[in-house]
Image (cartoon, rainbow, N blue to C red):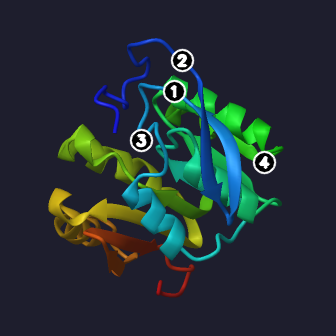
Amino acid sequence: MDSQHYFSSQPSGPDKRRPLAVVLDGKERNLVTSGGIFSPDGIDKGTGILLAEAPEPIGPHLLDIGCGWGPLALTLALKSPGSTVWAVDVNERSLSLTRDNAAALGLQNVRQSLPDDVPSDLRFDTIWSNPPIRIGKEALHSLLLMWLPRLADGGTAWLVVQKNLGADSLQRWLADQMSGYSVSRAGTSKSFRTLKIVRPHLGGTGG
């Protein structure tokens, strides 16, 4: 991972684009990357686990929290060409890279956005995220409480978190904070937990 604070809005260092060949949705894709973002050299372990374990996204409105160069958002868009995918990040270089990578793949259903620019009334059917744990507990909690309550009725969020960075305590905290939601551990792989958060249907319970 790049040692810069990839969660800053304007990362230091030049934006030197370089090619990046990765497999997304079962095919090799030729994309671009740069420094000053999260995991600039490829798909990090956690994101790879989420891509392998999360089921097919459903619904018209999909969200990637912390898009980086775009592996989750691009995969959501490839799997769900009829859906709109919101790729959200505070890092403007990440948004630019995701925009360019979506264009390179001919994906017209990806919307790159700063958090405050997402329409406030928009609700998401599926959320995927490898959340930025290293921003600190308070900032992470604020981030998750900004987005997870915006799940649509019956919507599901999938988060991947490293065990030694507090995955289990985060699960307990989410269960305490997200009253009425189903919060569970969906899997464990290579020192990572996959967490599943479901907003219940009106009049029903999540599962």
Left or right, residue 115 beside residue 166: right
Q: Earlier in the sequence, mark 4 or mark 2?
A: 2
Which of labels 3 and 4 is toward the front?
Answer: 3
- Separation (CA) of disc 4 from disc 1: 23 Å
Q: Is residue 121 visible?
A: no
Q: Mark 2 sits on what residue?
A: 16
- Separation (CA) of disc 3 from disc 2: 15 Å
- Separation (CA) of disc 3 from disc 1: 10 Å
**Label placed on residue 80:** none
Q: Earlier in the sequence, mark 3 or mark 1?
A: 1
Q: Is residue 41 above or below residue 62?
A: above
Q: Is residue 172 above or below residue 114?
A: below
Q: Mark 4 sits on what residue?
A: 109
Q: Are marks 1 and 2 in contact (CB under 8 Å)?
A: yes
Q: Are marks 3 and 4 in contact (CB under 8 Å)?
A: no
Q: Is residue 135 above or below residue 147?
A: above
- Separation (CA) of disc 3 from disc 4: 24 Å
Q: Earlier in the sequence, mark 4 or mark 1?
A: 1
Which percent across, then down, holds residue 134?
24, 42
Left or right, residue 4 beside residue 147: left
**Label placed on residue 34:** 1
